[in-house]
Amino acid sequence: MIDKLFDHASVEARMAARWDEAGAFRAGRPDRAEAEPYCIVIPPPNVTGSLHMGHALNNTIQDILCRFERMRGRDVLWQPGMDHAGIATQMVVERRLAEQGIQRRDLEREDFVRHVWAWKEESGGQITSQLQRLGASCDWTRERFTMDEGLSRAVLKVFVDLYRDGLIYRDKRLVNWDPKFSTAISDLEVQQVETKGNLWFIRYPLEGEPDRYIEVATTRPETMLGDVAVAVHPEDERFNGLIGRNAILPLVGRAIPIVADTYSDPEKGTGAVKITPAHDFNDFEVGRRHGLTLINIFGPEAQLRIAGNDAFLDGLSDGPALDSVLALEGLDRAEARKRIVAMLDEAGYLAAVEPHNHAVPHGDRSGVPVEPYLTDQWFVDVKPLAERALAAVRSGETRFVPENWEKTYFQWLENIQPWTISRQLWWGHRIPAWYGPDGRVYVAESEEEALAEALAHDVVNGTLTEEEGTAIASDPDRAAAFLTREEDVLDTWFSSALWPFSTMGWPDETPDLVRYYPTNTLVTGFDIIFFWVARMMMMGLYCTDRVPFDTVYIHALVRDERGAKMSKSKGNVIDPIQLIDSYGADALRFTLAAMAAQGRDIKLSLQRVEGYRNFATKIWNAARFAEMNGCVSPAGATGAPPPATDTLNRWILAECSRALADCTTAIEEYRFNDAAGAAYRFVWNTFCDWHIELAKPVLLGPDSPAKDEARAVTAYVFDTVLKLLHPFMPFVTEELWALRNGGGAGLLTLAAWPAIGDLSHPESEAEIGWVIDLISEIRSVRSELGVPPAAQVPLVLVSPSAETRARAGRWNETLRRQARLSAIEEATTPPGQSVQVVVQGEVAALPLAGIVDLEAELDRLGREAAKLDGEIVKIDAKLGNESFVSRAPEEVVEEQRERRAEAVARRARIDEALARLKAL
């Protein structure tokens, strides 16, 4: 017996346990041994993460695809796992240790890493249980971690192979440096933040003419200590005669050349720019063009490092001026800026200060300004890898859905720069490189292999004798002291780039790799096309010579109901777990699917989630009605539609087959909102609101062959509804499937997707369509014109055809009950004071004399029309104001457009009602 109320919490726990006990989601089930494989790899969430709304959307879409293909008989592998998340995890553990009064630098590296692993075992992976609450049907027995042994082995092999192919190298270059974490980060981990700053105008005296200056403008006066030149545009006549001369660096006294370079823009600032190659990317390129020295004046935490800095001190004379500059040693860059500006002002070098808004690069995790920093780092020359990744998408081996995201992919890969892959962290894949006594680097998959290479090299070069080499190799202590291991770890995205094949056992040719790779669909957000998608394409082609997936589905953002991006600072973050607690996982999943239109962000409102919770309740109540009226499929039913002779039954079977076809095609084409919409309209409107209501007289009547047929058809359609909805709403559908079938039909999640057949029956569809349209038109007129709900109104068919007359006779009682009609009559002309409706080309009239207060309704509708007109005028004024449109947030402008569209649509309905009333 189905309970009266749907309790989502108990259902979710019970169904999750059933799936787990049955191993329902395991890939490679014996009953699927001959089935076609289908594979999705989950975008591995950070081990530090908890479920946010982006995860909920992403994994709902993946789960829809996996459950759909599993029901279509395929051997589905949805590969789960987590990312070790280098910076994020190290930050969490450092904060935890700090609460105990322990700083990372107080520990040995190995001790700190042990703390991280302990934290991972204790607290990591919260998101896994949260994904299970969402209903994610991953094969959880295969969960992987980017730092586990198998994936680490893959990382070592790829690094070594790339190095030996000349695609990984070590170089001293300017990189994005995050001073909070004291590590390099890639260009993709930098976000530009609009900042209110200043432009400082500084006088640089000319060498030999101390009373004559060349004036530069800068947003970073603190870096001037590392200046090595002043650049002017070669065609800027203001500086004729100065190119080739020297300026004197204020405060420091260093003579620096004035060079001609097109980087200097005559229209900006003073036209002259200070050149600091060690602390600015553009200046670095100018320095390379002119052979300038690089002077790094900062330490790893962006503190001044000038005392004992040979590059800085070279050529400077001792004295009070230099001493005052050296007194700045150790200052943070922000404090150094204040002190240097004050010193420039005091010495008369500061010409002016102007407010200046500009974009300042910040670390996306630390939130602090990044520092262009000169340091030794490891890089991947990704240009050759990018060429293959570009060709694979251009040839159609891999496609993007929506297709427009290909342009973004192409643009980035066509302009790709070397990838900085080293990070100055302790948590992560340690770079497999060792340094010999002479500083020579040896890259190998193990220390033993690196040692053998180093000893062989030194023996060949005569640095060691063969006997000495043998002695070192045989003595563990001497061997350990002979090589020094690289301290840096790899960028987290390096291991993530190997995810599709490393999780399946690569580099070994495992059965899983052979069966499930390449994978089928990747579901991800647009924000990691660069971070992850492109890198997986490059690495997949490099390592396996095949694309890692054939389709990349890019979903949009989940925003709040006004269209604003969710953020903690705005206080508009919606927690998916709280929504699951309140409304159920099925309601949240269906909401996300129903709103997941390609290329359009989701505006999530609690009202929509509540509405789809009501949808789950509607399904539950329909199941109870079916049970109470004996609408149950017979044991051993084949899943084929039962024979039907009744018009209503033929109609609902036709509608069911149409909805099934529409939903199936939409999922295949990644139109999840259309699939959910087709399912919703059929279930709520067609099946529940119309079929069940129209079938009640038979189902509630005496036993008869007609009742048996109605029961069988209703049972078949409802079972099809459960299958149709299962990919979207797995919990409620699985529970009802079990309750309706007593467990004898097995799990719904492993049941066959309904076969799509042509069950159309034009005559039945036309007749039931006429019934529904007529009732709907009458209800609309009653509502718009204010007909009292209890009022019984006659319906007059105006010169009806024989077919319409026959239909009215067959459906007389239903029409009178559903449309609240007192009688159904015929006439050759419409009665006076009647409203006419046209259904399938024929006229019907509703006499309203004495039923509707015409004057009161005209007044009511007129006032509502005037109110809407005023609202439309106000909205048009806003949207016609260029200042409002350009300055207001995009979501606010879009909200105004939506409000206008709703007001215009409502105004049109009022006009129609007014026209009908005036016709009376």
Image: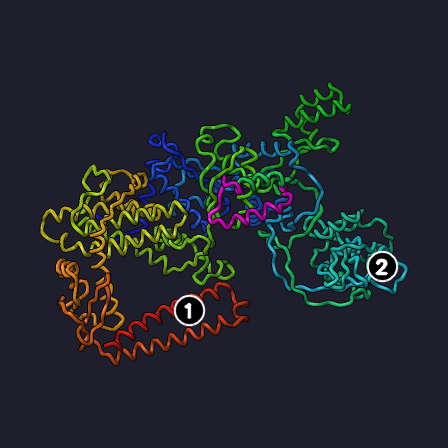
Give the residue at the far right of this rendering.
208
Judge whether 764 appears above or below 905 on screen: above
Task: Indicate the quadrant containing the C terminus: top left, top right, bottom left or bottom right.
Answer: bottom left
Please state if 508 lies on the left or on the right of 184 as rendered: left
As for residue 414 lying within the magenta part, the answer is: yes
| Residue marked by disc 1 | 900
Label 2: few (<14), some (14–19) or many (≥20) C-alpha neighbours in 10 Å = some
| Residue marked by disc 2 | 242
Please state if 22 lies on the left or on the right of 295 as rendered: left
The x and y percentages for residue 598 are 44, 52
Amino acid type of the residue tagged 2 in the rendering:
Leu
Lower sequence index among marks 1 and 2: 2
- Secondary structure at badge 1 equals helix
As for residue 5 lying within the magenta part, the answer is: no
Amino acid type of the residue tagged 1 in the rendering:
Arg
- Secondary structure at badge 2 equals loop
Measuring 50% from the left and 41% from the top, which residue is drawn there? 396
Coloring basis for residues: rainbow
The x and y percentages for residue 456 are 71, 23
Judge whether 507 appears above or below 723 on screen: above
The x and y percentages for residue 210 are 88, 62
Which sits in the foreground, 727 or 746? Answer: 727
Which sits in the foreground, 300 or 77? Answer: 77
- Which residues, given as a range, are shown in magenta? 393-422
Please state if 704 lies on the left or on the right of 286 as rendered: left
Measuring 15% from the left and 70% from the top, which residue is drawn there? 828
